[in-house]
Image (cartoon, helix red, strand yellow):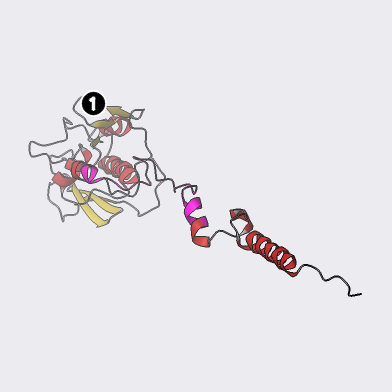
Amino acid sequence: MKPSTPNSPLLLLLAAGLLTAVLFFSLGPGRSDHEGSATPGKARDENAGKTPASISPIPGSHHAPPSIEELKSNPYALDPAPLPLAFGAPPFKRQGNGTIHKTDVMKMLDDLNDEGQETESDLGLLSRAIGSYHRIFHQNPVAGENREVVDALTGNNPHRLVFLDPGHPALSEGNELLDRWGTPFRFHPISGSHMEFSSAGPDGAFGTNDDITLEEPELARESS
């Protein structure tokens, strides 16, 4: 008697089903993105919207570049940094015309050409006034002509700071600062932070023996 032989078509059908199931689970869409089946490009696209954008500087901060409008209206917008000074508090005093008085220097210069002091003291007062200007603007008035120095000290500067009262009795009609004998002081710039101050003395002529000169040393000035 022959042994029974399994049904061949049934075995083939079962084998085909198993193969289909293996292929489905290995190649099908059942695997999630976090398991690595998603393409790298797709993962980058999905995460791109979740990446926080870089934070821009706050408008008006010293890190933000000035706008075109600001550059047109403010020629000093490219200054490296604003002045770290409280212009609304003493010794500064805002005026109705837009200028700001440096009241301590203005009061000091009230003693210029005072009868109770010597000319050397007058030159010392001028040196201290220029020193105050330098501490704020980090340079002396650009030019050394008497009128130009007076212009800078009476408010013709980037921040309209007034160090010398425009009505000071030592100022001439030509807006020059005069010594006690009526001769304009001489301001001789040696460098951007080094200046020489001179009076022609009683004879009113420079280059004679009675000239009085004070040379301001080029020293590191303390902050104002």
> Residue at horizontal 11%, vertical 39%?
175
Location of residue 190 (image quadrant) = bottom left
Query: Of helix, strand and loop, which one carries label 1?
Result: loop
- The one nearer the camera, 219 or 115, is 219
Q: Is residue 153 above or below residue 220?
A: above
Q: Taking 159 as reference, is 7 above or below it?
A: below
Residue found at x 32% / y 45%: 131
The amino acid at mark 1 is Gln
Q: Position of residue 8 (x, y in %)?
A: 75, 70
Crowding around mark 1 (Cα neighbors within 10 Å: few <14, some 14 to 19, many 20+) is: few
Q: In the image, residue 78 lies at what x, y percent?
A: 28, 49
Residue 137 visible in this rendered orientation of the protein: yes
Residue 175 in magenta?
no
Front-lying residue, 192 or 31: 31
Q: Position of residue 119 (x, y in %)?
A: 25, 41
Q: Quadrant of residue 101?
A: top left
Q: Which residues are magenta?
A: 43-71
Q: Nearer the viewer, residue 150 or 135?
A: 135
Query: Label 1 belongs to which residue?
Result: 95
In this view, which residue lies farthest toward the bottom? 2
**Residue 115 appears in the picture as rendered:** no
The kind of secondary structure the magenta stretch mainly shows is loop
Pick out the residue farthest to the left. 173
Q: Residue furthest right?
A: 1
Which residue: 64% across, 64% down? 23
Residue 46 falls within the magenta-colored stretch: yes
Where residue 89 sits in the image (x, y, percent)?
36, 28
Q: Residue at x 47, y 54 (%)?
A: 45
How many numbered marks, from 0 up? Answer: 1
Quadrant containing the C terminus in the rendered view: top left
Residue at the limit of the structure toward the front, as seen here? 1
